[in-house]
Amino acid sequence: MRKALGFYEQAVALDPGFAQAWAELQVVAQARNGREAIQLFDEHQPDICFLDVHMPGLSGVDAARHIGRRAHLVFVTAYDQYAVEAFAQGALDYLLKPVEPARLAETVARLKERVDAAKPAVNTDTLLQQLAATLAQQAPAASPLRWIRAQVGQNVRLIAVDDVDFVRSDAKYTIVAWRNEGQPAEAVVRIALKELLDQLDPDQFKQVHRSVIVNLRAISHVRRHENETAEIHLKGRKDVLPVSRSYLHLFRQM
């Protein structure tokens, strides 16, 4: 029995018609994001992966590049305006949401033929690089993050990004320092610093240290040191943030 892994934007079952199209296929796991897809792939080593293209953080294409030719890949997308051409150019399998039975049957037939004949997966690293480049050029630009969902004690708060003074990574978590009705406050989010930085407005938020992102509007002044580092002092907060040598150029005019 062949094994498959599903990677979808929401933790939902694969299309109900799939069981009819390929009853012998066993779905061993379903992932909610790209990182989880990679972990589950390494754990289960499925023969086939269904990957949703657009996800926050690691995308389906990012996950596909990790998987490489170790499994047959089928990409799932709702962005038919530009995705169809990108997939067709690379001869990669894809399904458009909502999945049509006829298209699903065609995809299953191709997969069965490749698997039964022990043919190698067509998703070479070169094709996946080309796909990533094409999608990046044609995809609509994502709007910057406006709200951050964070844990404050036993509660979950929606924090307006404009209220955030800085973000700092800890050993296990990411700390968001923000203003709660004008008063300094902190909250915890379970998202990597780099992943959060990619979603913030680059004109407003800058990484100044490997573990610190700062809101430029929250800066009172920057004090430079002789060892080519600096420290940031904030408006209305006692926190002092480090600026490492590689980010000092951001403040040369200050």
Image (cartoon, rainbow, N blue to C red):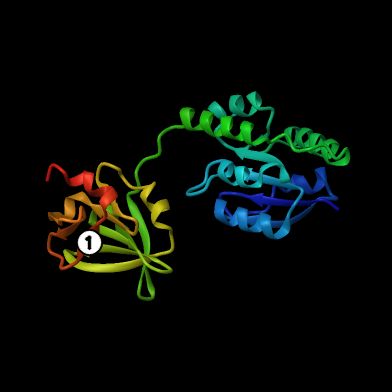
* Residue plotted at (67% across, 45% down): 50
Q: Find residue 179 and report its horizontal and vertical position in percent.
A: 21, 63
Q: Residue furthest front?
A: 227
Observer able to see residue 97: no
Observer able to see residue 154: yes
* Residue plotted at (66% across, 43% down): 68
- Residue carrying label 1: 241
- Residue 102 occupies which quadrant of the picture? top right
> For this rendering, which residue is in front, 154 or 243?
243
Label 1: few (<14), some (14–19) or many (≥20) C-alpha neighbours in 10 Å = many
> For this rendering, which residue is in front, 159 or 120?
120
Answer with left or right where residue 139 lies relative to residue 254.
Answer: right
- Residue 29 occupies which quadrant of the picture? bottom right
> For this rendering, which residue is in front, 187 or 227?
227
> For this rendering, which residue is in front, 230 or 153?
230
* Residue plotted at (25% across, 62% down): 178
Q: Give, as a three-letter code, the residue at label 1.
A: Leu
- 35 up-or-down from 55: above or below: below
Q: Residue furthest bottom?
A: 154
Q: Find residue 112 and report its horizontal and vertical position in percent.
A: 84, 39
Q: Find residue 105 and report its horizontal and vertical position in percent.
A: 79, 36
